[in-house]
Amino acid sequence: MAQLWGGRFTKQIDELAWNFNASVSFDKRLLDQDIEGSIAHVTMLAKQEIITREEKESIISGLHSIKKDVEDGTLQITGEYEDVHSFIEANLISRIGDAGKKMHTGRSRNDQVALDMRLYTRQQVKETADCLYDMLQTLSAIMKDNLHTYMPGFTHLQKAQPVTLAHHFGAYFEMFKRDSLRMHDIYERMNYCPLGAGALAGTTYPLDREYTAQLLAFTGPTLNSMDSVSDRDYLIEYLAALSTVMMHLSRFSEEVIIWNSNEYRFVEIDDAYSTGSSIMPQKKNPDIAELVRGKTGRVYGDLMSLLTTMKGIPLAYDKDMQEDKEAAFDAIDTVQHCLTLFTDMIRTMKFNREIMEKSAMRGFTNATDAADYLVVKGVPFRDAHGIIGRIVLHCIEKGCSIDELSISELRQFAPQFEEDVYDAISLKTCVEKRLTVGAPGSAAMDKVIRMNEAFLKDFWTRK
Ligand code: ARG
């Protein structure tokens, strides 16, 4: 046990208690951030003449050598240390001697860990946005290829009105676009540096907090030292945004699973993203989509766990907060894996365009348009609705679609029907005449796709 404290103790800590308290098994992930933060801290200490230039340089080269040795595998982060901070400090002192003992001047592990976690999260927020960017690029490419791929749009999972595949995927484009903008907002709001807050009440050393904030590319220092060490709002916001990403991915998964089913066959998931059954030789299962849907629960759980951990903690730092890490790491890893795999799965998925189109032709998806046709011919909408309803019932009994009825059959329901009805209620017309902003008509979709492209060109992580 190599701990940073001990002066006021007369007895060794119990072994189980030590293990229970330790965080090194998971916070070793913060090694790079801890070193980056310490370099900024000692650079500031030297500028403020709290330590000498030589001490600063010796600390920095010691930190670099620790990082290198861990990367090379010649130095292992073991359970002998309480946390990553102790691991680094103990190793630094054994490498450079007394100068190493000065690194922690004017700092506490409370502001240190607050900084590490912020540096790590800030990077991950960007990486999540990058995964979303790949998803958006993939969706945009599929949309461009499928402006005229007609398919049924659903409400209540019942065929409703015809749309296109471009339009359906366009809905997901909007969802993931908002997700990416949430990442941007979180980044901006969290980008303040807690270093210098000390344990909770700042320090009497003349630290230059603006300077450390600037060295670490933060917008500025945080403005209340008690809040600085106890704020985990940014993680909660991030996990809430990640939960929303998963909710979107889960809905998308559900649709892919339905579309890939033997009954629908709208799509075929590539072999590379499917699995077989140990007993049923004919099976090709959409396990990736199902797992993405399933993992949504675990990300929601991570958010709930952090919210619950934080709800009763008095100011300022309490050890409960150490529990933020595993939940956050799990949510971050899960969402990034899910986004990456899901994007690859839809990129390689085959779309059965004829089956989609046939499905749109069956199921009376043009019933609204048939009613609108009668409206144009002077029938009030409510009456037209009733007439088409009766026609649909007739068609169900006959086993045909509206456009398969002859003009004389149609006229038995309403004398206003003329030859032009067939064109008016064709699948193509039903879709292409829907041209309001956001509607599926290809001319309307084309404008949206151009706006999407401008959005992607100006994407916030790529500026
Ligand atoms: N491992 C701790 C955490 O993750 C580091 C901060 C320890 N601070 C303390 N006062 N014990 O929160």
Image (tube, rainbow, N blue to C red):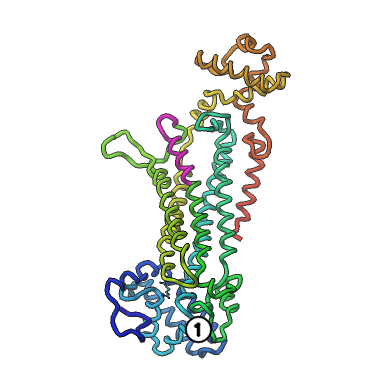
From the viewer's side, name the closer residue of 76 and 364.
364
Position of residue 415 relative to residue 58, above or below, is: above
Kind of residue at disc 1: Gly
Residue nearer the viewer, 433 or 235: 235
Q: Is residue 44 above or below residue 73?
A: below
Q: Is residue 40 visible?
A: no
Query: Residue 418 is drawn in which quadrant?
Result: top right
Q: Where is ligand 1, by quadrant? A: bottom left
Report the residue at 60% width, 23% height from top: 367
Point 44% across, 51% down: residue: 338
Q: Give x and y (percent) for residue 10.
A: 30, 85
* Image quadrant occupied by the C terminus: bottom right
Magenta stretch encompasses residue 378: no
- The majority secondary structure of the magenta stretch comes to helix
Residue neighbourhood size for the residue with mark 1, other residues' Cα within 10 Å, grouped as few (<14), some (14–19), many (≥20): many
x 59%, y 36%: residue: 147
Residue furthest right in the image = 378
Q: Which residues are magenta?
A: 249-264
Question: Height in image: 351 above or below 133?
Answer: above
Question: Quick one: SS at disc 1?
Answer: loop
Which residue is located at x 57 percent, y 26 percent? 365
Tag 1 residue: 106
Position in image of residue 459 (x %, y %):
60, 56
Q: Which picture quadrant has residue 288?
A: top left
